């Protein structure tokens, strides 16, 4: 099946709104300034994708180019009008970013999770086909969201690479498995009712012995023994 014909149109920036869910949660200001300077020198090489939202338009992909044009005060921008019958806007955004712009893996994972829930019915195979990616690629990104939160935050901040994040999550998962196994074995080795007491612990006397010690008859015997001469026989 051939791809649908693209409709190009020059639109005013004032009529375009940013995407509801940006593929980049954080924008590198320096890289954005460099892109703006490049557009100011040679113009916009690649059109951005937009879709109609009532009387206005909303960015589907090319959000950084849209921001760069706003930065340099460009009045209009070339756009591809995305129709309602085309591929999901979220899928187009991910595909276009993967082809042209390096997206942070943590941010891409969040985008894939949203697309998986909203457009693919939770089926990773459907998501992989939609994005023209392998199932392994899709699952490797989604697994980041199930990993350690600190690792995900470091990856999002650019402090570690994707490969390092994977290794750290694998190490953490291995450590959790060992901890769970030790706890399970400990319960098997030392049942609660037979757990050995620590050194210095004093075993409590049975309730019957405590009652007998505080009975009046026992108190009389103790008092008589105290008054008896030391040499007297019992």
Image: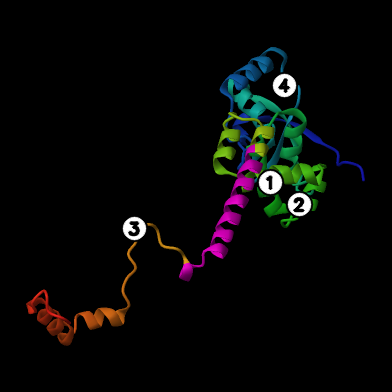
Task: Please name which of the two marks, 4 or 1, marks the residue nearer to the observer.
Answer: 1
Residue range highlighted in magenta:
168-194
Q: Position of residue 232 (x, y in %)?
A: 12, 79
Was residue 185 drawn as part of the magenta stretch in this picture?
A: yes
Q: Is residue 89 visible?
A: no
Q: Position of residue 145 (x, y in %)?
A: 63, 46
Does label 4 or label 2 sit earlier along the sequence? Answer: 4
Do the residues under discs 1 and 3 have CB atoms within 8 angstroms? no
Does label 3 or label 2 sit earlier along the sequence? Answer: 2
Distance from the alpha carbon under mark 1 to that under mark 3? 52 Å
Residue where numbered disc 3 is placed: 200
Residue where numbered disc 4 is placed: 44
Does label 1 or label 3 sit earlier along the sequence? Answer: 1
Distance from the alpha carbon under mark 3 to that under mark 2? 58 Å
Q: Residue furthest right?
A: 1
Against 14, is 185 above or below?
below
Distance from the alpha carbon under mark 4 to that under mark 1? 33 Å
Tell whether 153 sits left or right of 139: left
- Residue at the image position 80 percent from the left and 36 percent from the top: 7
- Residue nearer the viewer, 41 or 176: 176
Does label 3 or label 4 sit earlier along the sequence? Answer: 4
Q: Residue furthest bottom?
A: 217
**Residues packed near mark 4 inside 10 Å, few (<14), some (14 to 19) or many (20 plus):** some
Name which quarter of the figure residue 210 lies in.
bottom left
- Residue at the image position 68 percent from the left and 18 percent from the top: 39
Was residue 171 drawn as part of the magenta stretch in this picture?
A: yes
Identify the secondary structure beneath mark 2.
helix
- Residue at the image position 57 percent from the left and 64 percent from the top: 188
Do the residues under discs 1 and 2 have CB atoms within 8 angstroms? yes
Does label 1 or label 2 sit earlier along the sequence? Answer: 2
Q: Is residue 3 visible?
A: yes
Residue where numbered disc 2 is placed: 124
């Amino acid at each position: 099946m051939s791809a649908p014909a693209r409709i190009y149109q020059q639109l005013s920036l004032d009529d375009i709104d940013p995407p509801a869910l940006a593929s980049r949660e954080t924008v590198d200001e320096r890289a954005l300034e460099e892109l703006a300077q490049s557009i100011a020198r040679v113009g916009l090489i690649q059109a951005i994708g937009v879709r109609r939202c009532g009387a206005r338009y909303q960015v589907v992909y090319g959000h950084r180019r849209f921001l760069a044009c706003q930065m340099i005060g460009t009045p209009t921008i070339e756009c591809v009008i995305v129709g309602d019958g085309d591929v999901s806007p979220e899928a187009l955004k991910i595909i276009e970013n993967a082809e042209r712009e390096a997206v942070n893996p943590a941010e891409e994972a969040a985008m894939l999770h949203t697309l998986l829930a909203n457009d693919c019915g939770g089926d990773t195979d459907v998501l992989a086909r939609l994005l023209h990616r392998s199932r392994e690629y899709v699952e490797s990104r989604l697994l980041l969201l199930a990993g350690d939160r600190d690792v995900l935050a470091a990856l999002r901040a650019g402090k570690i690479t994707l490969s390092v994040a994977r290794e750290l999550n694998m190490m953490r998962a291995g450590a959790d498995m060992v901890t769970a196994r030790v706890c399970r074995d400990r319960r098997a080795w030392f049942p609660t009712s037979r757990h050995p007491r620590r050194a210095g612990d004093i075993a409590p006397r049975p309730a019957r012995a405590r009652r007998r010690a505080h009975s009046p008859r026992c108190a009389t015997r103790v008092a008589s023994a105290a008054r008896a001469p030391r040499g007297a026989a019992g």
